[in-house]
Amino acid sequence: MPTDQPELLHLRADGVSVLLRLPTDRQAEILWWGTDLGPLGDAELSSVATASVGSVPNNSLDRPYRRGLLPERSQGYRGRPGLVGHRSGDAFAPLLRTAQLTADANTVVLTAVDERSGLQVVSTLQLDANGVLHLHHTLTNTGDTAFEVGELALIVPIPADATEIADFTGRWTAERMPQRLPLREGAWLRQNRRGRTGADAATLTMVGTESFRFRSGEVWAVHLGWSGDQSVWAESHPDGTRVLGAAELLEAGEIVLAPGEEYTTPELFAVHSAAGSDGIADRLHAMLRARAHHPTTPRPVVLNTWEAVYFDHDLARLQHLAEVAADLGVERFVLDDGWFGGRRNDLSSLGDWQVSTEAWPDGLGPIARHVQDLGMQFGLWFEPEMINEDSELYRAHPDWVLADPDRLPDTSRHQQVLDVARPEVSAYLFSCIDSLVKEYRIAFLKWDHNRDLVAARHHGRAGVHAQTTAVYGLIDHLKDANPGLEIESCSSGGSRVDLGILQRTDRVWASDCNDAVQRMQIQRGTAQLIPLELIGAHVGPPTAHTSHRTHDLSMRVAAALFGHFGIEWDIASATDADRAGLREAITLYRRLRPLLHSGSLVNVDHPDPAAMAVGVVSKDRRSAVFTYHQIAMGIREAPAPLVFPGLDPGLHYRISRLEVAGAAATVGRQPPPWWTADETVLPATVLGTLGLPLPVLHPEQAVLLELTAL
Ligand code: GLA
């Protein structure tokens, strides 16, 4: 480490500080990550450097405790170490020392070496303009024998007053359900061995001050941008260790570095907020919206054929569905599963990405052209990483499966996984998809992935890492070859929602559950990570296929508005009244989408567990839309007043009821007077505190309100 380097380096952005200690004889260490410490001059930094050195407790190592970027066993670290690996059993406890540093604006690149162990780690830290800390490491084997990597972790410190953990779990049709627990001594460890992100993924691991809520409390959160196996943890020990960590989960022997080879971790996104979990979402949404490839065109109204026709692919029926859709204002028509090979159900043909001559004797031209002539984009479903044993592809290439060919894992949805890291497999997939995209002017791919990977094996060793990077490469190649092509990440509904896949896709299918009550909760969890324009949300049929609950159209529309709006319903057989309601809903969505897809998400900390309320406030805070959902029959005789956080406290707002697709069903003797008044204008200070009384609603009813500053 050059001796003229300061002892501390201070990064600041948008209310966040990261303070790095740069000792000359050890690794660098994050001393502080959290609230902005304000400008600190050289003299102050030097005082902080001295003042932050801790004491030496009894019965411990005889020097103040230090934790580097990669906490080390060689330093007596008792938590989960940063770098686990070995060289034929040795080099198991590396001792890294920073050898080089480059700092450019808010990006710091640190090179740490351990010559004896033959290891070099280049760590890149960037505090972006939205206050999100990005961190990744590249490990190089500088020795002259092989080094096996067990784990290379991304670890950030959290302070002592972060005492509660909140993350997510779930299952098919109940993705990203929140859970919360106290952070005690020990580790809260979430591990994913599905080979895909999973419906039960932690998604975002948040720790916060006691009772932190959507809009209050201090929160620290991490997310690993990776779609393969991973571990994420919050850890606390009596020695003062308090960290959040995450790493790719590697199987034994999965990554063995030959001399000169390197391994790069996925990117960790570390987010701090002094304004509750909505503050975390705000920073992440701003970061994603600032990406060069973030979708900027108005998010088109989608019609997806899955719940409308399932495998019943009939040209006349689908052409008629397209006509009804176009007439209502639909802008993108997506033909789902069932168009290829011999696929008349989910038993066969994955891998045979040639148009079915039985279902589509004249190819997809007649439907694609019809859709395009009606002024809509044409989209198509694929499940590229999968293969059915009953397929032409499997019969020709049984060795293309990502498994030991003599020990195939059990099928799941009757399918196996293709070894995409084999160049001939990804070349085959590229050529099938690319030629169809070009032939039919396909604007949108729904890219599905409907099973977990089990004992994934590539070239005789564990293969999830190779598979994940190969799939990323395939998507990148298709995107490069087809400028403007949009891709949706779907995986048995919402089982692949992460910032690794979203680096190269344009939206996620949040869930196969279109039940409005359930969906609002799934979307709330999903929106903790990504903004509404990236979250597919469809109006389903009156009775939801996945829950068998029936909801009014107004409720289903209110849920689908808080996402990238679409329809998944056989609207050709819907009633005239429902079609008229959908037409109104589409008109409203088109009017509101500039606000919904650029504003700040506001989750109301509503006191009644039988209700949920959410809104979007425009960046200039002059307009907003809120929805209140009575999700169950609660114990309150009338709803608790609805408060509207996030408005400009200096402004007055006009409140308008948006009654689309029918009014919410109310009960009770009379609604509050403002409900029927000609005009209601109130100061933001009142709306954010007293709020507004609501009429007594039947359960599973929604109210939509628009707020406009005077
Ligand atoms: C998965 C998806 C659905 C649909 C089906 C088609 O389950 O989540 O939306 O595309 O596959 O088989």
Image (tube, rainbow, N blue to C red):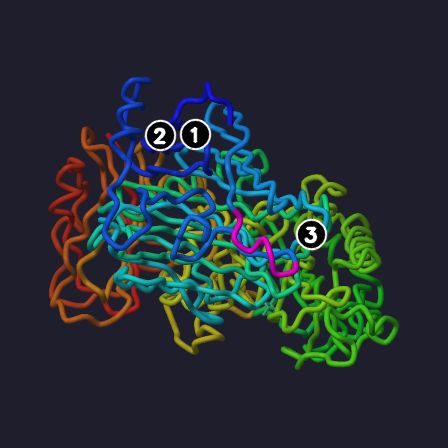
Residue where numbered disc 3 is placed: 257
Residue hosting label 1:
129
Q: Residues within 10 Å of mark 3 (few under 14, many from 20)?
A: many
**Residue lying at 38% horizontally and 43% vertically, measured from the top left:** 271
**The residue tagged with tag 3: helix, strand or loop?**
strand
Magenta-drawn stretch contains 91: yes
The reply to whether residue 658 is visible in this rendering is yes
Cα gap from disc 2 to disc 3, whole angstroms? 39 Å
* N-term mark: 1 or 2: 2
Against 557, residue 143 (above or below) is above
Q: Which amino acid type is marked by label 1?
A: Ala
Gap between marks 1 and 2 measured at Cα: 6 Å
Crowd tier of the residue under label 1, counting other residues whose Cα lies within 10 Å: few below 14, some 14–19, many 20 or above: some
**Which structural element holds mark 1?**
loop
Find residue 70 and report its horizontal and vertical position in percent: 47, 46
Marks 1 and 2 in Cβ contact (< 8 Å): yes
Point out the stretch of residues depicted in magenta: 88-94
